Image (cartoon, grey):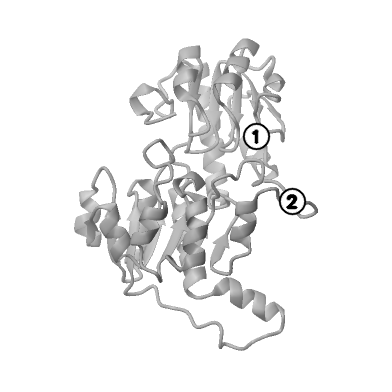
Amino acid sequence: MKLLVYSTKSFEIEPLKAANTGNHKITFVTESLDSTTAVLAAGYEAISIFSGDDASLVVLETLKDLGVRYITLRSAGYNNVSIKSALRLGLKVANAPDYSPHAIAEHAMGLILAWNRKLMQANKQVHQHNFLLDDLVGTNVHGKTIGVVGTGRIGSILIKIVHGFGCKLLATDIEQNHYLESEYDLKYVDLETLCKESDIVSINVPLNYETHHMFNKKVFSLMKKNALLVNTARGGVVKTVDLIAALVDGSIAGYATDVFENEKGIFFKDHNKKDINNEQLKALLAMPNVILTPHQAFVTKEAIKNIAETTLHNIDCWVEDRVNVNELGYYNVTSE
């Protein structure tokens, strides 16, 4: 099958080639998928896209007209794809749901430690030959209350990690994991209670209609003033304008994130020699109580390998007309 890979990163090419045991004809392009670049898919039966690509109705209609039949995502999240529109058009879509929850959970823990022990500030300081400790007094993770919003694959692993630090664990989710309750002394509570009692709150939910702007002015007002909010999920779960206000007025102490609400067109690109045209992002980057990484939580060698293998597995299943548990349909789609 002919496969066009949109938004190709340099580190993806060799793993995708290695995973291509079915000898599919793969073409790599760095362009993101949108209404103007959809024409690149002419002559291809399948495309592979990333989380920042636009697979909305208009784009899907163009792809359908060009002869594309299959879309495989190199990500777990699919909020950038109009799944129901794809189904109506007869397009099959599959994601990479379980490529490496450890990578993202570990990154969340890294952000927590970086914040609590002021590692970013310390690194900058010693590079300026300043070895004083006066401004580097941190806090222990041990003994703190950690609130985990979403106890799916990633949230569950984060719970196991922070349990090892000796933390009190709270969580909220529409489905409760009784194994985590019994083995890790996890207590499920509602979001309001979690925010009121947690020293650190970690967001680990997908972005959908229910979770969009879940963290807003009302929720920030419930949190401890010394609380840290950690986000390795999706930027849109947090209402950025309310977040900035909360950071400025001291409603919360800090924000450590790997994502940004309006990161499309900004993340995964080098803006070193040009201005970033986003005032909210500029505001966050100017704040000393914000740690921001460029959506890199998934970028480990193990995760990249797993994503590549899942991407080609999805193609193989379609070619061989096999059942694919990664295929998205009405039965496993919660939102557009």
Quadrant in the rendering for residue 327: top left
Q: Nearer the viewer, residue 218 or 193?
A: 218
Residue that appears at 43% across and 60% down: 229
Is residue 12 depicted above or below 57 in this figure?
below
Is residue 22 depicted above or below 321 in this figure?
below
Residue 271 has which mark?
2
Disc 1: which residue: 17
Residue that appears at 53% across and 75% down: 118
Quadrant in the rendering for residue 332: top left
Q: First in sequence: mark 1 or mark 2?
A: 1
- Left or right, 60 with reference to 223: right
Q: Is residue 110 visible?
A: no
Residue type, mark 2 in image: His
Label 1: element kind: helix
Label 2: element kind: loop
Q: Quarter holding the C terminus?
A: top left
Query: How packed is label 2: few (under 14 Cα within 10 Å), some, or many (20 or more)?
Result: few
What is the tally of numbered marks visible in this picture?
A: 2
In x, y percent, where is residue 132?
A: 61, 89
Circles 1 and 2: CB atoms closer than 8 Å? no
Quadrant in the rendering for residue 322: top left
